[in-house]
Image (spheres, grey):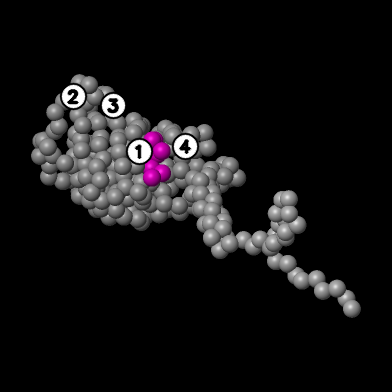
Amino acid sequence: MPKFTPKLVGEVKVRPGRRTFWLARPSSLSIGLSLTALVLVVLGLMAVGVPVVPLVWYRLKPSMTTILAKQLHKPVATESQAAEKQVDEWQPELDPVLPKGGWLAIPSIGVKTAIVEKPTAEYEEALKQGVWRVPELGTPLKRELPTILVAHRYGYLKWSNMYRKENSFYNLPKLKVGEKVFVSWGQREYEYEVYAADEGVKISDYSADLILYTCQYLESDRRIFRYAKLVKK
């Protein structure tokens, strides 16, 4: 009669010093913890990989940065479209400690960068440095037309992650209504509050004092917009 050998599911262990055998099966708790750990690892890799995807795409398609610069440069507002607003003569106090050039700070998303001043013909060179002010429109000092600041979202291969965070609009989608934006201009600090967020091809509200925008996707003319009003103190 053939010897019966039971099928074992699990791990057979031997108690040291004794001739005792028992079958050890993974507990429900250990299985649950293992699955949780696996899910967390996968989510962590996905979170880390999101910023890397555009950079890999840039490497495979070097012309992408030029394409995106052209998309950002496509007019979303012109002086003729933006009707002049009635503004008062209020200005923040002059602070000689502040830099003479233009600076942008958005604390909630970590932006802290100089505003690049270059003519429209040199827009691509300006965007390589970071945030560019559209020269045909307004400034914080001269507010008859809105001030428009533009920047890449993903930047360039040579940019470090820290440079990208501080000098681009990578995190602009995270800027929420009610949050503050600060612009230092002519040694005066202007405070703005975001009142609207939008996505589309063109500016939808020219009454804003400050408009920020960047590309939404890698190969698309859709843009992410944030509209802000000047806070007069």
Q: Nearer the viewer, residue 74 or 22?
A: 22
- Which residue, given by chain and number where applicable, does mark 3 sit on? 101
- Which residue, given by chain and number where applicable, does mark 1 sit on? 110
Q: Is residue 59 magenta?
A: no
Give the mark nearer the N terminus: 1 vs 2.
2
**Mark 4 and mark 1: span between their CA atoms?**
12 Å
Residue at the extreme front: 18
Provide the secondary structure element on which disc 1 rests. loop
**Mark 3 and mark 2: span between their CA atoms?**
13 Å
For the question of whether residue 59 can be seen, the reply is yes
Q: Which residues are magenta?
A: 165-171
Give the mark nearer the N terminus: 3 vs 2.
2
* Residue type (three-letter) at the residue carrying disc 1: Gly
The reply to whether callout 1 and callout 3 are in contact (CB within 8 Å) is no
- Which residue, given by chain and number where applicable, does mark 4 sit on? 161
- Asked if residue 54 lies left or right of residue 139, the reply is right
Query: Residue 143: horizontal and vertical position, in percent?
Result: 19, 39
Give the mark nearer the N terminus: 1 vs 3.
3
